[in-house]
Image (spheres, helix red, strand yellow):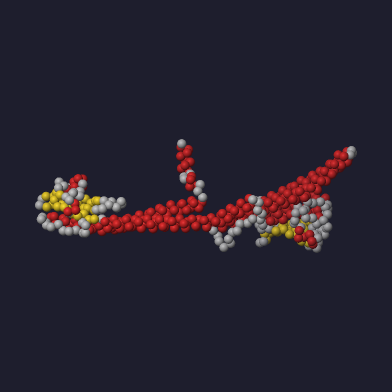
Amino acid sequence: MSRLTERLRLRPWPWFRRLPVVARLVLAVAVTMSLVLAGAAGLVYWRVQAALDRQLNDDLTTYQRSLDQAVRAAGGQLPPGPSGSLRQVLDVQGRVLVSSAALHDRSLLTPVELGAAAHGATVRRDVGSLLPITSDTLRLQAKRVTVGGQGRIVIAAVRRGHRDEALRELLAQLALASGLTLIAASYVGYRTARAALRPVERYRGGAAGLADGAQNLRLDVPADRDDEITRLGHTLNHMLDRLEASAERERRFVADASHELRTPLTLMRAELDVALHRPRSAGELTETLRSVDTEVQRLIELSNALLDLEELGTAQHLSRAPTDLADLAGTAVAPHRRTAEREGRALTVDAVRAIVDVDGRWLRPAIGNLVDNALRHGAGTVRLTATVDEDGLRLCVTDEGSGFPPEFLPRAFDRFARAEASRTGEGSGLGLAFVQAVATAHGGTAYAENTGRGVRVVLALPC
């Protein structure tokens, strides 16, 4: 039982949460306006009632004084009061000594009130109620006076008819005005809520269309407004952009993998078929295994390159960290020095001593890819230059080969692009694509150009 009570306390009005948003807003407006209108009406009614009661009490007090003076003047004639007023004089035992004809010698005081007045208290009370409407509504006041050593209770009463009628009219007008105001406020709240939530419903319809398979869907967001709903629309459009980009990367990954992996797999299948369909010597089997191993290594390199590109494309943020540029360049080039020595080529590094804010995990293999491409497809000395200026970090790798064909330069950084006419050798065509992806992830650019004495590939990054 205590657990149920706790849940109800933490989640009040569960029925309210199940209502539509528009209904909840309208209900909240109606309840709030009801409280405000009730408070305002109560204040107005209290102020008017206080003013009417003050006037009525002043009239009653004035009449009471004139009666007191007439009673003290023994044998004096009791003065007439306001229109419809009544008067009565009692002794301390409650016997009626003088009374208005309309009272028929009926005492206006109860025994308790008589006792209070006999002991010197001023008694005031109303006879009859405001609602429901009754006749002969009065306000009376009783006070003791002494006449010739004897106590007398003098009672003055005035009719409340005009006061009660004014208050009933005020109540009717306040109820009518409050009701109309509540209806108007609820209607305005309903229309406002519907207008405010109409874009949300439109966005919901767009999302439903996307769930049904709609392509290139974007929400129609006004460009001349900047409110919560508009910002929601921009956020959803941004989400749709990312979803479409993710889907495009997935399609490209599948297409690239199926296209590039088909060739080595086919070659491996052919080698194995030949080896299985006729007897072969141990040397021939060894050669077949070496050929298959080469294709397997190529498959591994292709898979790793494709996975790296996919990870770069889907990464939300790079892990930038202060990095020593000279150490970064030296570490990236070190694995390729043995290859350069084996081919009798020079490999030089000219990097300034500076601290740059980059992601070394990705920049290091990007530099390695540039150097590897220059060693594989270029000629002569390979130079890596790394400088820092007000524009950021600039990495430049040059060689002394024959250069790229002019028609190849615009697509040099495309996936699987190869300059077969001028550069021969093995490669997947993903090295420069990886470099471009690293540059884009850092917010920079990459480009290649022929220098007349070879190729220059530049990686420019903000740091």
Instruction: Tell me residue 211's x, y (percent).
Output: 63, 50
Quarter holding the C terminus? Answer: bottom right
Instruction: Tell me residue 49's x, y (percent).
Output: 30, 56
Q: Nearer the viewer, residue 124 or 354?
A: 124
* Residue 132 appearing in the image: yes
* Residue 242 appearing in the image: no
Q: Residue at x 23, y 51 (%)?
A: 124
Instruction: Tell me residue 284's x, y (percent).
Output: 88, 41
Give the total of numbered labels.
0
Q: Nearer the viewer, residue 79 or 413?
A: 79
Q: Is residue 456 above or below residue 293?
A: below
Instruction: Tell me residue 304's x, y (percent).
Output: 74, 47
Q: Residue at x 17, y 59 (%)?
A: 80
Describe residue 152's horizontal placement relative to residue 345 as left or right: left
Describe residue 53's horizontal placement relative to residue 364 as left or right: left
Q: Nearer the viewer, residue 319 or 84?
A: 84
Question: Which residue is the extreme one toward the top?
Answer: 1
Q: Residue at x 50, y 48 (%)?
A: 19
Q: Residue at x 66, y 56 (%)?
A: 216
Q: Is residue 350 above or below residue 6?
A: below
